[in-house]
Image (cartoon, rainbow, N blue to C red):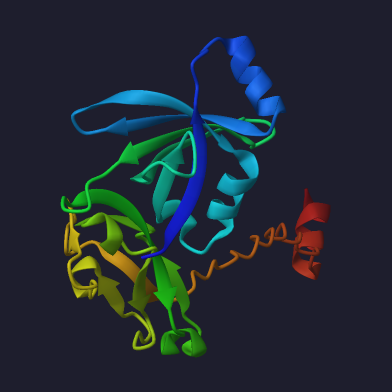
Amino acid sequence: MTRLQLSSKTREDLRKSTTKRLRQEGLIPATVYGKNEKSRAIAVPVDEFTQILRTPGGRLSLIDLKIDGKGVKAHPVLIQEIQRDPITKQVIHIDFHRVSMKEPVVATVPVVLVGEAPGTKQGGILEQFTNDLHVRALPDHIPTHIGVDVSHLGLGETVHVGDIKLPDGVELVDAKLDNVVATVRLPIVKLEVAPEVEKAAPAEAEPTAATEAESSEE
């Protein structure tokens, strides 16, 4: 698992005006939570946190968080929640969860399909139904993603949650093993119904010699 570094400083003034000023100075307001420990308000540099998010698997990385100086001991934390501005999408607040390296944690890990399904070459469509899974592992064993091999899937074949091979030390949490992860299905073909042709009105029969004669007798 990737292990990254992040610096921070304590926030003493929690007023909205101060929070706004922090953002203008290139800092993101954040909070650190921990088991049996009081929450702590901090601020982290935008550029450092952006670099973490750009790192492959950064969202699930174990972070050594240093508070108020390089000489202090780093706290191992995981990103619990990221809040973004609904319009600009900029990060406006972060929740960090302080963890113990000896106690398992639960994390939501994305599912990534790996390989090319042979069924797609037969006209099928590869469709993914499970995009992430909850797993339990020690903080430094949480995978950045769960790879699911689909290189054996033929037309009409499916891979289920129970078919996934997890790394050592990682277990699924609250997962139904019969849930579908991905399948190769036939494309849906819509048949166009041809419009009905209007039936022509029956043509009037032309008078025959017999009917003309009858008319003249009348």
Q: Where on the picture, by quarter, is residue 18?
A: top right
Give the left or right position of residue 181, taking residue 60 as reference: left
Residue lying farthest to the front in this orientation: 71
Counting the numbered discs, the total is 0
The quadrant where residue 80 appears:
top left
**Quarter assignment of residue 169:** bottom left
Query: What residue sits 21% from the left and 57% below the top?
Result: 138
Tell me if 212 is positioned left or right of 55 in this view.
right
Which x, y percent locates residue 54? 58, 57
Question: In this rendering, would 102 be left or right of 38?
Answer: left
Q: Quarter holding the N terminus?
A: bottom left
Observer-nearest of 148 and 57: 57
Query: Could you say which is closer to the camera, residue 74 or residue 140?
Result: 74
Front residue of 70 and 184: 70
Q: Tell me residue 105's x, y (percent).
A: 22, 49
Q: Residue at x 48, y 56 (%)?
A: 58
Q: Nearer the viewer, residue 80 or 45?
A: 45
Q: Position of residue 26 (x, y in %)?
A: 68, 34
Q: Position of residue 211 (x, y in %)?
A: 76, 61
Residue in view at x 28 percent, y 74 percent: 159
